[in-house]
Image (tube, rainbow, N blue to C red):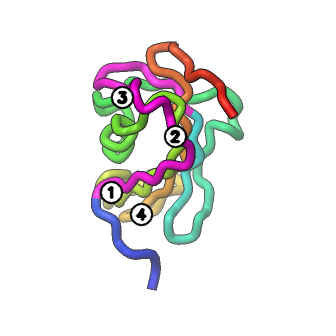
Amino acid sequence: QGPPPVSGVKITTIRNGDRRTYPQPGDVLTMHYVGKLRANKQVFDSSIQRGPPFEFQIGVGQVIRGWDEGVLQMSLGEKAQLIVSAEFGYGAAGQGPIPPNADLVFDVDLLAINGVRARLRE
């Protein structure tokens, strides 16, 4: 009996963003993230371990569907956890260390939108 099933992407805010500035499809985002398998919490990828944040274009299919849909709902400076169902992740094929049909958990931190960084605050 594992965690309850998730459909699509479920977002839990860890730290509020500015609640005003939201990414739009085509924007270039700068984020830090840690990706884990939902079943056993094993980390399969981490931008933090690599060093520089990850930059990508949102909403245009450069990243998994769970990110394209979930991160668009985050505001600048927000830190959140995304629970991504397999069909919104890597699906039946899996990829590298990610097995087929795996639900994923990402801790994501939206640092900048089109180069405009979030104001640091405590």
Q: Mark 3 near mark 2, Cβ–Cβ under 8 Å? A: no
Q: Return the disc, 2 or 1, that comes first in the chain's sequence.
A: 2
Which residue position is annotated with label 4? 102
Say which element carries label 1.
loop
Q: Gap in Å between the C-alphas at discs 3 and 2?
A: 20 Å
Q: Gap in Å between the C-alphas at discs 2 and 4?
A: 28 Å
Which residue position is annotated with label 2? 16
Q: Quadrant of residue 19?
A: top left
| Amino acid, disc 3 | Ile
Q: Residue at x 28, y 62 (%)?
A: 7
Q: Residue at x 31, y 20 (%)?
A: 26
| Image coords of residue 118 (percent x, y) | 56, 23
Judge by depth and name the residue closer to the eye, 118 or 25: 118
Magenta extent: 8-31
Which residue position is annotated with label 3? 58
| Amino acid, disc 1 | Gly
Q: Of discs 4 and 3, which sits in the foreground?
A: 3
Residue 95, magenta (yes or no) = no
Q: Return the disc, 1 or 4, that comes first in the chain's sequence.
A: 1
Q: Return the disc, 3 or 2, that comes first in the chain's sequence.
A: 2
Give the left or right position of residue 51, taking residue 88 as reference.
Answer: right
Q: Indicate whether 117 appears above or below 43.
A: above
Q: Of discs 2 and 1, which sits in the foreground?
A: 2
